[in-house]
Amino acid sequence: MELAFETVGLRRLCESDSEPRKRLPGTTVDELQDRLADISAATSASDLIAGKPAFDSRPPGRISFDLEGGYQLVCVGNHPVPPLTDGVVVDFSRVRRLRVVLLTQESGNG
């Protein structure tokens, strides 16, 4: 799948080898890199199963991954017009482009 990033800073954090290790725990970095590799290797969003993603089928289609240390990686469909089933919900089997919009630590965790 194609992968884009909401900001340059988020792209740097996700694509660099050294930058995330300065700011995140090692196990979180390893899991983040695994999830990004899974996304890149997938044919469609419905192929994503590793990391137990949570899917929200309201357009544009949101997928979130819980990472070690209480962090969460959040992606949304990155299509000009989201592929919909019956014109209502996102058809994740046709989502081939994702945009990473957030990498955050949930309050109260690790």
Image: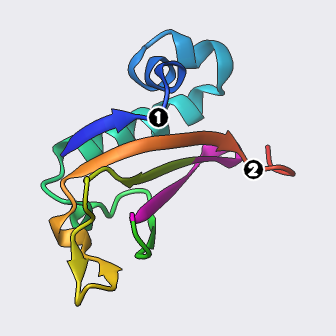
User: Spatial distance from mark 1 to mark 2, Cα to Cα?
Assistant: 19 Å
Q: Quadrant of the C terminus?
A: top right
Range drawn in magenta: 60-72
Q: Residue furthest bottom?
A: 86
Horizontal side, residue 91 vs residue 21: left or right: left
Q: Is residue 68 magenta?
A: yes
Quarter of the rendering containing residue 26: top right
The label nearer to you, 1 versus 2, is: 1
Residue 6 - label: 1
**Amino acid found under the numbered disc labelled 2:** Glu
In the depicted view, which residue is nearer to us: 40 or 67? 40
Residue 106 - label: 2
Horizontal side, residue 31 vs residue 71: left or right: left
Horizontal side, residue 109 vs residue 85: left or right: right
In the depicted view, which residue is nearer to us: 76 or 18? 76
Disc nearer the start of the sequence (1/2)? 1
